[in-house]
Structures are given as C-alpha cells and as structure tokens.
Amino acid sequence: MAASIPKKKKLFGLPIRILLGFIAILLFMSGDGVEQAFLSKYIVQLGFSVEQSSFVFTIYGITLTVASWLAGTLTDLWGAKKTMLLGTVIWIVFEIGFLFFGLHLHLYTWMWIFYGLRGFGYPLFAFSFIVWVAYITEEKNLGTALGWFFFMFAGGIGFIGAYYPSLILDRIGEMYTLWSSCIWVFTGGLLGVLTVNDRDKFGNLIYAGNKQHKWKEFSKGISILWEKPRIALGGLIRTINTSAWFGFVVIMPLYYTNTLHFPTSTWLQIWAIQSISNMVFNVIWGYIGDKLGWVPVIQWFGGIGSALACLLYFYGPHIIGANFATGIVIAIFFGATIAAYVPLSAIMAAESSQNKGAAMAILNLGAGFSTFIGPAIITIFYKFIGMQGIVWIFTSLYILSFLLSPFLKGNKHTIPLKHSIFKGKVEMK
C-alpha cells in the first residue's frame, strides 16, 4: 500500500515533500533542456553534417534508454535518494567533458562519447523520483499527481529550457549558454536529493522490493515484460509518445530557420510556447483521465491528435502561411496532443501495484527509447526520404498507437488481451 503522509505536511493540497520535489524536477530539467532547441544546429555550424549531429543525439538516446530502465529498478533496490544523487553527479561530470573536449576542442569522437554518457544523468534523477511519487500516492489520485510531475518535467526541459536561451543566446553565445545549464542542474539536483525521503512516517521503507534477494528484484525489471504483457504494450506506446518530439528537435530547428527563414530566437519562442502547452495539458489530461477514463484520452487525443499534429508541423506553414502566428498554433496543438499520453503512467503503476518500480522501469524504458528512436529515424532515413518522409513516419507511429491503446488496462472499459493482436493464450488478471 502507498505510505501515508500526515495532513500537516501538506500545502495547496500537495505533500510538502512532493511539492519541493516537483520544484527540483523543474530546475534540473530546465538545465537539461537549455540545449534542446539549438544544439543540433550549433553542431552543424561547427562544421559537422546533419547526419553526424543526429548520430550524437542517437547515442545519447541509447544511453538514456538504458538509464530510464535502470531508474525504476535501482529505485526499488537503493531508494530514490541515492539514485537521484547518482544521476546528478553523472550529468554534471559528463556535461563538463562534452562542453570542453567535444564542443570547445571540436573533437567529434569525444563529443558523442561524453554526450552519450551524460544520457545516464537525467533519467536516474527524474524517473526515480516518479517511482517515489507512484509509491506514496493513492491510485485514485495517481493520474493527477503524475500529471503535475510531467507539468514540471515539461516546464523545465521544454519551456524554461527553450525560453531561457532565447533571452541570452544572442548576448553571451552558445557556449556560455550551455555552461550555465550546469548551475540549473546542480541546484535542482541538490534540492531533490535533500527533499526525497525513502521511508514513511513510521520509519519503514516505502518500496515493496525484497532487499534480501536483490538479483530477483533487479530481474523483475525484465521478467515483468512477459509476466504482464500489458506492461510491455504500455512501454511500446510510451516509446511512440515522444518519438516525434525528440525527432523534431533535431530537424525542425533547421527546417524552420533555414527553409522557412524564421530567426533562431523566434523558433526558440515557438518551441517554448509548445512546451507551455504540453505543461498545461499534462495536468488537464491527467485530471480528465481520472474522471472519464485513461485509455480513451490516450487513444483519441494522443494517437489521432499527435498524428494530425505531425502533419501540421510540416504542411501547416505551406497551407496557412509561414509566419509566427501559424507556428504558435501548431506548437500549441502539438504540445497538447503529446501530453494526452500522460494517463499511461497511471495505467502502468496500477497494472503492477506490488512492483511499481519494475512497471515504471518499463515505462521509463519506453520514454528513454523514444529519445533514441526519434533521432535514429532521421539518421537512417533522412538522406533517402527527406523531411516530408520523416514526418510521415512519425505520423504512422501515432496511428499505430491509436490501434494498440484499446488493449491497455485502464480505469474504465478495456478490451480483453485475449482478443487483441497478441497471439497465444495469455490471460490477464
């Protein structure tokens, strides 16, 4: 059962520790997101190709994927505090290596090595925190609580991470802007580590894992895939969820600034507004999912909505007009539809109530894999099918998620797995 927290430790309806943890997530992810909307273009400006730039992000996505899976599993074994501390140290150490050896000295090999290793950082910090939240929150409020988590997550990596450099990039340049991200991460990391408590008010560990059989607990982060096939399905849908987001962050800065001739500062503002939309709708969809059903929100507003948003990102400026207003409308719609997958976190936690760490590890694995698959699609296919073809690949993935999502186990009606596209005689309890 979720550990109870005394009422006197609540503020604005939220436990104070969770509230402070959300602020820590906002600060940490702001630092992580500082580079997001301009780093790919900056690497190209240093003399490297689009494919080389996307390869850097692809390697980063691979390590981030592994770390995203590890976050849930290690939280069950070590607790959130130690895992978050490890993530903070990794991020800062390898960011320094990336900035100095990779970008400053223009050493491409060290660029993707250090940036790749830095990929272990934010998942260990942020995704171990989300496991902690899942353990201490009652299921009836889980969608709403996780909606607030993603509000802060998106607010950092997307809004502040994009808007902050739009204010200072022209004044201090790319390198000093990137160096300043370390201050954000250190501050958020310190606050998070000091805030999280791995024990309930009675002094008991809140995690369900058996610490006397650590390998067995560790292996649950893998075995749960076939023990509970809906967990595996949820991980796949989570991969699709933000695949276009992390793909577009590589190619859309080039498309909007080079092809559509938007100033870089204008593009950064568009990306920041998109993140505001994503922040707000994370909370809205979490609340609506708790009230009306998690699966319908994911299927219709997430699957169909995101497919339409991808097409609008490419065709919208040509049809409506390549201007700031058009970019804002598209960005708001895209941010809102990507957020519609937020009830998936509640589904995964509810699906395995006794091993939430393992279930959330698979959710985090999907989140991490999306950061890999997005840039990887560009690395592999861009030279063959160009920008338009890339957009249609992402659109097709969201249509696939629309077809798969009814087979998830939601808080309302769901399709029995035995009637789904999965073959065999797997029955879900």
Image: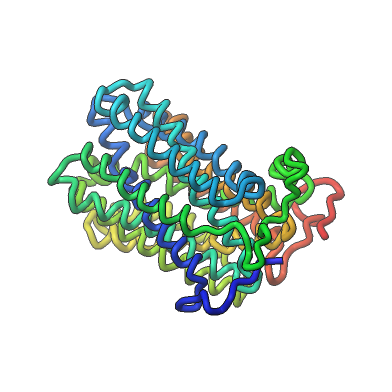
Scheme of colours in the image:
rainbow
Above or below, 253 against 48 in this view is: below
Horizontal and vertical percent position of residue 178? 27, 41
Q: Residue at x 33, y 55 (%)?
A: 316
**Relative to 26, is 101 above or below?**
above
Find residue 89 and report its image quarter: top left
- Seen at 45% across and 34% down, the residue is 60
* Above-or-below relation of 219 to 349: above
Q: Nearer the viewer, residue 158 or 87?
A: 87
Quarter of the image for the C terminus: give it.
bottom right
Task: Find residue 325 and report its horizontal and vertical position in percent.
Answer: 24, 62
Describe residue 187's horizontal placement relative to residue 226 as left or right. left
Where residue 198 appears, x then y in whole percent? 60, 57
**Which residue in the rendered view is the most extreme toward the left?**
171
Q: Can residue 294 be seen at all in this image of the molecule?
A: no
Question: Residue lying farthest right?
Answer: 425
| Residue at the image position 48 percent from the left and 45 percent from the top | 85
Residue found at x 35% / y 29%: 97
The answer to whether any part of residue 191 appears in the image is: yes
